[in-house]
Amino acid sequence: MITLTRLSGSVFVLNSDLIERIDATPDSVITLVDGKKYVVSESLDEIIAAVRTYRGQIVAVSSRLADAPEEPVQPTPDRPLAAVATLPSAGTSSAHGDH
């Protein structure tokens, strides 16, 4: 999800996976795969940067999850659903030595 600003100034988040195209007319018009359009105050370059950052974060978290040791979490009465995987904390380093 990326954070964008309507021309009215209201802020919203958008699932960037649904973007079909972005037109600069000169306002940025985002067209989704279902045809819905959003006019936003961010420039074309700012939107592209936000999408790249978001997708990079997904890859980084996925990499950390792949490197995390398997620790089964058992359900308890106060927590009837168990986690599939434990997310590494932001301050831990991966098995590859990078942060």
Image (cartoon, grey):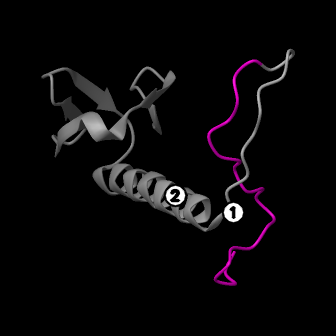
Decide: is 65 above or below 31: below
Q: Give yes or no for residue 82 being in the magenta stretch.
A: yes
> Dot 1 surroundings within 10 Å: few (below 14), some, or many (20 or more)?
few
Quick one: 50 or 43, which is closer to the camera? Answer: 50
Q: Which numbered mark, 2 or 1, is in the foreground of this view?
A: 1
Decide: is 70 above or below 7: below
| Point 34% across, 48% down: residue | 43
Residue 18 locus on image (x, y percent): 26, 34
Residue 50 as seen in the image, left or right of residue 66: left
Q: Amino acid at mark 2?
A: Ser
Residue 5 locus on image (x, y percent): 45, 31
Location of residue 73 (image quadrant): top right
Decide: is 72 above or below 93: above
Q: Give yes or no for residue 85 being in the magenta stretch.
A: yes
Q: Amino acid at mark 1?
A: Pro
Location of residue 74 (image quadrant): top right
| Residue with the mark numbered 2 | 62
> Dot 2 surroundings within 10 Å: few (below 14), some, or many (20 or more)?
few
**Callout 2 touching callout 1 (CB < 8 Å):** no
Decide: is 88 above or below 73: below
| Point 57% across, 57% down: residue | 61
| Residue range corresponding to the magenta coloring | 80-99
Q: Which numbered disc, 2 or 1, marks the residue that appears first in the sequence? A: 2
Mark 1 element type:
loop
* Label placed on residue 69: 1
| Point 35% across, 32% down: residue | 40
Residue 8 locus on image (x, y percent): 43, 20
Residue 11 as seen in the image, left or right of residue 50: right
